[in-house]
Amino acid sequence: MHTREPIYSTAIGAGRALFGLLRVRPAMTGRTKLPATGGAVLAITHFGYLDFALVEWVTWLYNRRHIRFMAKKGAFDQPVVGRLLRSMKHISVDMDSGSEAYAQAVVALRAGELLGVFPEGGVNASFTVRELKSGAVRMAQAANVPIIPVAVWGGHRLMTKNHRSTLRERLDVPVSIRFGEPIRVDADANVATSTSALHDTLQTLVDSLQAEYSVPGAGQWWQPAHLAGTAPTPEQAAVIEAERRRRKAADKKSGSQKSGSRKSGSEKSRP
């Protein structure tokens, strides 16, 4: 029996309407790996900005369960979006201090919630699974719940980093979602070793989806370099991402300095 959540249901409906308009064709395998009740960490690959909505959609279609996602604090700081996220019980993550979000996530898992996380961090432009952060493993271990590895392929063709898809490109896109075998992390398990094993599992799932994908990807921007696509290699993507972060930090610092200068000037002008 699932509690009624009108706002969450409305969000699901909006997502279904959007994907319906785009004629997205989802193919879900391994759905029986999703628990009908109880807490679990859904560790999801992150190649596109709509991966969360796609996984949320197919999970709801299968067993009507809601996923509580961990999202960056910046989204929660937006008046309207933040109110919606909080009402849907998603969890705000401060990238400079994640201890509070971690604690909230463990509480949610122990209360029987499904928690959606992207252990790679941000969207990965190489479309291969990069090194994972350890949070997914640590939370599952602390709450004594399984990790469900989830691979999404094709969703990045709808919306992703470093490429603005046209409406034509977004129509009739096949999206494959595969749920892997639940992973239990024992209390005495090594976190680093378990995280590395999760990485390998996710990449294996992605490899299988890519091999089965119905659209040839050779020469395509959305295909990884090792499969004859034109996406950047993991090494190239890392360089691009480092430069993006450097520019972002510089812009933030410049903005703070300008704000400080204006404040100082205002104080000096007072009689």
Image (tube, rainbow, N blue to C red):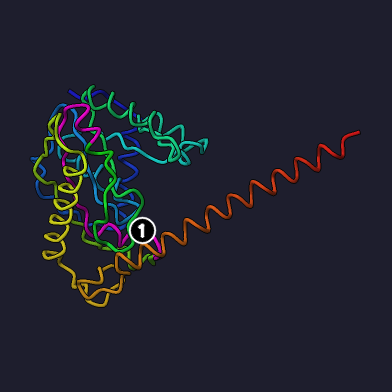
Q: Which residue is mark 1?
A: 159
Farthest residue toward the right? 271
Query: Does residue 214 lie above or below 255 as drawn?
Result: below
Q: Is residue 262 magenta?
A: no
Residue, far bottom: 219
* Quadrant in which the C terminus is drawn: top right
Left or right: where 230 falls relative to 81: left
Q: Quadrant of the N terminus?
A: top left
* Mark 1: secondary structure: loop
Q: Is residue 150 above or below residue 167?
A: above
Q: Position of residue 158 (x, y in %)?
A: 32, 59
Q: Residues within 10 Å of mark 1 (few under 14, many from 20)?
A: some
Residue type at mark 1: give it.
Met
Range of the magenta residues? 138-164
Residue 32 placement: quadrant: top left
Judge whether 256 appears above or below 203 on screen. Answer: above
Residue 182 drawn at (x, y percent)? 10, 39
Q: Residue at x 48, y 41 (%)?
A: 74
Taking depth in this image into account, of 27 and 105 the one nearest to the observer is 105
Of 150 and 36, which appears nearest the observer? Answer: 150
- 122, 69: nearer the viewer: 122
Residue drawn at point x = 15 percent, y = 48 percent: 197
- Give how far across and how far down residue 223 sits, in percent: 25, 69
Q: Tell me which residue sits at (14%, 61%) in the image.
A: 207
Residue 7: image quadrant is top left
